[in-house]
Amino acid sequence: MASSTALSLLLFPLLFALSHKATFEIVNQCSYTVWAAAVPGGGRQLDPGQSWTNEVTPGTTSCSVWARTGCSFDGSGNGSCETGDCGGLLECQAYGSPPNTLAEFSLNQFDNNDFIDISLVDGFNVPMDFSPTTGGCHGIRCAADINGQCPSELKAPGGCNNPCTVFKTDEYCCNTGSCGPTNYSMFFKNLCPDAYSYPKDDATSVFTCPGRTNYRVVFCPSSCPSELKSPGGCNNPCTVFKTDEYCCNSGSCSPTNNSMFFKKLCLDAYSYPKDDATSLFTCFGGTNYGVVFCPTRDDPNQTGSGSIGSTNVYTKTLAHEERADPWKPRRTEAATAASSSSVTALGLESDAPSSLFPLT
């Protein structure tokens, strides 16, 4: 009896974890209607400000949430969408057609962690934030104006294609399992550092949260945190809170969640007072400079990227030394521990032109 009781006590935490369904709140903050889709989960029309809650069973893998745009459905739920269409159904039973921004996840996997990412491997249609509401782990955001800056050869009605969709070559699709970043993937990566930009972009794009975490997926997230908003702009947290944590008055401080908001959108810019390592550059004496407000993306001399509010902001210099140690989003230790061999063992490896999770 004692041994069976001990066994029950050992198994109870595992059984509890496996019985807890993860809750996904899907919110439309766009100024237009989207048709949210989830596999598993189906689909739903979301007008501006509306939300939909979906529950997913622990242990489920290769899950996706995305927004469809330009849709029209009849009373039976049959129709079509300009982006993200899933076989002409309102209630999706399969993954969507490119281009579409994807929130991807597999629950309670290696070391009982959830694996999450935002993927641009199927292109981009709607800005997205994918963040935990419990668990205290790292949220992911891709809120840049990719559609407005999309290279002409990747443009699609309602979105921006990934180059694999357009060119269908191994260089971009990684069909042989071996590929690296390209100029096109770097276009996506520079604008959304946390997101998958090509199929093997695992090192900077997959994150983990503890099992039993709940999540929120937001379409068209606010570009400035509400506590930093000001008329006509977005304040730095020092201006708002006036504390040493943000203002570095004592001469010693480090990145904060608020500074990381700015850094993700504008990699080359100072995000807090001691951000020298990734934000200070040198040019030869006698160099001439130009400063352009609201530049177009076509200028090859532009550096930096991002969007705050509805205006894209870049700084252009006529000479620019590349920093020796560029800032990169950090992967969690648990995600690093789940090496490619571990990911393969979990059944998360994909031969299709997608990110960590197979979509075909």
Image: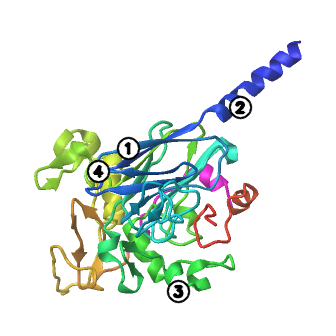
> Nearer the N terminus, badge 4 or badge 3?
4
**Which region is colored magenta?**
323-339
Q: Quadrant of residue 344?
A: bottom right
Q: Is residue 190 above or below residue 110?
A: below
User: Which of pointers 4 and 3 indicates the residue nearer the eye?
Assistant: 4
Please give left or right for residue 110 compared with residue 315 in the image.
right
Q: Which mark is residue 167?
A: 3
Name the front one of labels 2 and 3: 3
Location of residue 290 with respect to 39 vertically, above or below:
below
Of residues 95 and 10, the one nearer the viewer is: 95
Residue 71, percent from left and from top: 39, 63
Callout 2 amino acid: Leu
Position of 77 with respect to 14 (left or right) is left
Residue type, numbered disc 3 = Phe
**Label 3 environment density (alpha carbons within 10 Å; few <14, some 14–19, many ≥20):** few
Write down the residue under mark 1: 51
Q: Which one is in front in this view, the residue at disc 2 or the one at disc 4?
A: 4
